[in-house]
Amino acid sequence: MRIPCEWLNEFVVLDIEPHDLASRLTMRGLEVEAIEEYKPTFNGVVIGEVVTVEPHPNAENLTVCMVRTGAETLPIVCGAKNVQKGHKVPLATVGAMLPGGFSIEKRGIRGVESLGMLCSERELGLSEDHSGIFILPADAKAGTRLEDMAGIRDVVLDINVPPNRGDCLSVYGIAREVGSIVNQRAKLPVFKLEPSGNEEIRGQASLAITNLDACPRYVLRMLRGVSMVPAPFWMRNRIQKCGMRPINAIVDVTNYVMLELGQPLHAFDYNALRDKRIEVRPAGEEMIFRTLDGEDRKLVAGDILICDGGGPVAIAGIMGGENSEITENTKDIAVESAFFNPYFIRQTARRLGIRSEASLRFEKGIDLDNVDFAGERAVFLMNAIAGGTVVRGKQEIYEKRERKNISVSVGKVIEILGTTVDQGTIVNALRSVDLHIVKEEESGFVVSVPNFRHDLDEYADIIEEVARIYGYDHIPATTPVTAVQLRRRENKDIFAKGIREYFTAAGFFELINFAFFSTRDVESFLIPPTDERSSCVGIMNPLSRDYEVMRTFISASVLKSIAYNVNRGTRNLKVFEVGKVFFLDPQGLPVEHPAVAFAMAGKEREYFWRDPCPEYDFFDAKGVVEGLAERFGFEVAFERSDEPFLNPGRSADILFDNNKIGWIGEIKDEVLNVYDIDQKVYGAELRFDRIITKGLVNPTYKPIPRYPQVTRDFAFSVGDRTAVQMIINRIREVSPLITSVGVFDMFKKDVKSIALRVVFQSFEETLTDETVNVLQGIIIQEVTGIQGVTLRT
Amino acid sequence: MNIDELRKRVDNELASLKDFEDVRRAKASLLGRKGVFSEFLDGLKLLEKDQRKTFGKEINLLKAATEGQLQETEAAFAEEEKLKAEALSWIDITMPGKVPVLGKLHPITQTFEEINGIFTSLGFSVAEGPDIELEYYNFEALNIAKDHPARDMQDTFYVKPGVVLRTHTSPVQIRVMEAQLPPVKVIAPGSVYRCDQDVSHTPMFHQVEGLMVDKRVRFSDLKGVLTIFIHEMFGSATPVRFRPSYFPFTEPSAEVDIGCVICRGKGCRVCKDTGWLEILGSGMVHPQVLRTVGYDPEQVSGFAFGMGVERIAMLKFGIDDIRQFYYNDIRFLSQF
């Protein structure tokens, strides 16, 4: 809400600097987001009184005005038609400077000397109006500087009104808060509406409401024979500063009073109302209705409408209809001032996608008790500006509402705020914002909530009012006294933390991607519809196809990040991501599982002068999984994988306890192509909920052996497709004294050869050569027993 | 007995020394047990007593001199050897070293860990909830009415009627309170989602929620705990201000601002010339929320708070574009 201080000053005396006021409003919960200063963009312009207007002797379209500026009377040649004798006008005198650097000089125009220029509003930078000379109010004082006129210098506070404070969506509403800050009471505008004719509204217009819940109060007033003039400068100026556009005096007055008092109003062209009746009722069925902005709106049953004898003339509280809007031919006006139930307005406004200044206020709730006052004020102003006759009386339906009473104990206020405040302070604070104290006792008090406050329902709300007015700054900062309550972290969280540590220690960068992806990602990974990863949790209202479902695996996101980097020149990548994957569950809420994916592309470093830097391959990636298993003390096995997105020869399923927990391998080129990656990527993904099913392994101490270990190397010729793991397993089974079996070489000349190093270790004694020789013999016997394996000599 | 012959022999031998091995051999052949000097000294036995004395003296003098010379030569060779070895081991120490390849945590994770660390040291435990949440937990239970604008499809991703992607971490408050009795002292870090994507919004982002409920938890305690947090996070000289605000699930509610970390309160573009930056939302748990989970607001009270992790990370690291977090550009990730 934009609040011009010049206007605010009408309700409270602002003897406070605007920046100071802004910070105090902010600390009241009315955050001032911007302070905008209005300054004249001209100088040397004075108010002049037109003494005479004569035709220019040598030019048909010009006049020569004699303009009095206090002591002097100056001849001014003028081209505008609207200047008359007696008008007060802005006169840019010789030497004056107008916006855009336009300076005024003494000039002869067709033989007549002109000592200045009369200005339009646009020439002064005050508005877009250039239809004629800016005619000033009759009481403007000739000879004074124009820039001293009210409204030209101003400060506008742009206030972020919280959604529960609809009462602050008006200058008066803000004035009430300001009054509480500066120890004043905001004054309502004073005026007296005098009916000028004998005509009574009864007989001219009738009123009915079919749903009092939707519309508990409606007031209709009338004005006849107005002239369609523009609103005066001061009114247009204020409306504009509040961010609205002036239209004509009648419409401007409805907006002006809304901005002033917070009550949205609507003016109908009385003669367009069929049967001279107004009825507030819900729409019975779907229909199309054209609003005054020229749009056809689809109304549905339940939308609250303002109808005349023939049908809808306005969507209640949201927008008027084209059929009854004020036009330049309008003579007679019917003014609506009403209270519409916020719920109905919100429903309809949201469905129609309309956020008008009126609906904004009705949605948050306006002051039921102020409805008629605002209507009266509008008719008064219209009459004052546009003339006409005020019709006597009003048509009104009003279902009065009891004020809410809330009782609060002082003890509770102190207990919740953590500071000692006495009842007197509390009561004064509440009274300063027009909350009435209806009962005061030793233990507490009862607050009667005025109808303009829709945010006060129970004691906590009153405590907030006290705290807000007392000042959050005055409440101390304390440390809580509370019992310790420990919650164990879930295993998956402990595991996730460990995984992050492992991967960063291993030189991987962590990625964080959005948890959604596209069904196209599932297709790009060639995952068949029967796979559970194809059954994604869909979003009903996705932002785009890219984010239409929740991801069922992380690697698609990882590939996107790789593509992003590769396409920007970073080709050596080790990345990982820990996150949730989501699956449909026919039983209830979708299920969420923790997973980790990693990928390697390129090489560890581009070059190093001393060493070769080989490209990553399958075994670099596999080692990462083996290391992870070792780090967390669980055993994994690898089996050939048939994941559709991996190269069959270079991929494996990762098993834990014979259950598949993930996959690892070289991503197929056809998948990489879709993601625009032109280099090999080795990746893996593991579901770690499947790893921690048996809990986390806590490290337990194993004694350090006191006896030396013995190593023996073996070389075998093996078949091309003999799995080395099988040989290793055979050797391990030979004796518990064998503590490790490592592959230290593999090469192929005519046949494939592998070289193994076996470590023997006893915890009881120093192993003798004889003992080891026996085991060595068994190892050779066992291994050469495998088809196609022979000992190399 | 020809001393001159001996001297000649010694001189020849010494003159031909080229390396350590020569020195060793010369030592043996001249000074050894079967060496030339021994031979000559043995020969003395055959001489007359006075001759023996004269010759003996001369031979011994010559022997001592020879020993001395051999030692000198040996030392010279050692020095030469050392220099040779040094020359061989010289390397260009200006050649580049092999820098370890480090991995790094995403700045959001780093920020999470810092926030979590501060609160756990203050006795808060960590709780989590699902990303796909019942509308009830995300809204109703938090006192956000059915027709509240936040529930608009324009703000919230719906999975199906009644099921949403959580728009904040606040539903964890409800889940925790439903599952246990007070005292409650938890934080809930996690991902949240909103239908918003532009220069300053991403459809997924991260929050940390906090909740403390017990007997006699006061607004002043909220101020105390959050002030400690901010001072730990941004430095103990950081100005903090609590100002009234509105959240449906807290009452009184407070927005917490810190003195602008960019301009130090002088006013700049980031703080929109106010000198203050909004850093988190907080408030006393609304009695209606307590009643909803079956707590008695007459018996217990509490405070809750929530903060955007990206926002805090941006301020801490000086990042000016939230979207950077999700490009995952290594040139970005490697900076933190």
Image (tube, grey):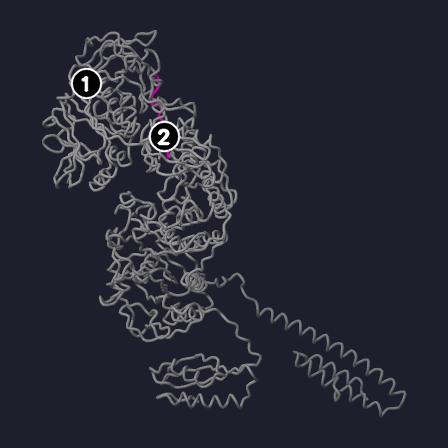
Q: How far apart are marks 2 and 1 (CA)?
A: 39 Å
The spot of residue A356 in percent (x, y) is 24, 34
Q: Does the magenta stretch include residue A81?
A: no
Q: Is residue A700 left or right of residue A675?
A: right
Quarter of the image with the C terminus of chain B is bottom left
- Counting from the top left corner in percent of width and height, residue B182 is at 44, 52
**Amino acid type, label 2:** Leu
Query: Residue at horizontal 38%, vertical 23%?
Result: A12
Q: Which of B279 and B10 is in front in this view?
A: B279
Secondary structure predominantly adopted by residues drawn in magenta: strand
Q: Any mark on residue A157, and which?
A: 2
SS category of the residue bearing label 1: loop
Residue at 39%, 33% (x, y): give it.
A446
Which SS class for mark 2? strand
Q: Quadrant of residue A715?
A: bottom left
* Chain designation of label 2: A
In which quadrant is the N terminus of chain B drawn?
Answer: bottom right
Q: Give the range drawn in magenta.
A: A33-44
Classify mark 1: residues with Cα within 10 Å, few (<14), some (14-19) or many (20+): some
* Amino acid found under the numbered disc labelled 1: Arg
**What label sits on residue A392 in the rendered view?**
1
Residue A654 on image: x %, y %: 35, 72
Tell me if mark 2 has few (under 14), some (14-19) or many (20+) residues whose alpha carbon lies within 10 angstroms of its own: many
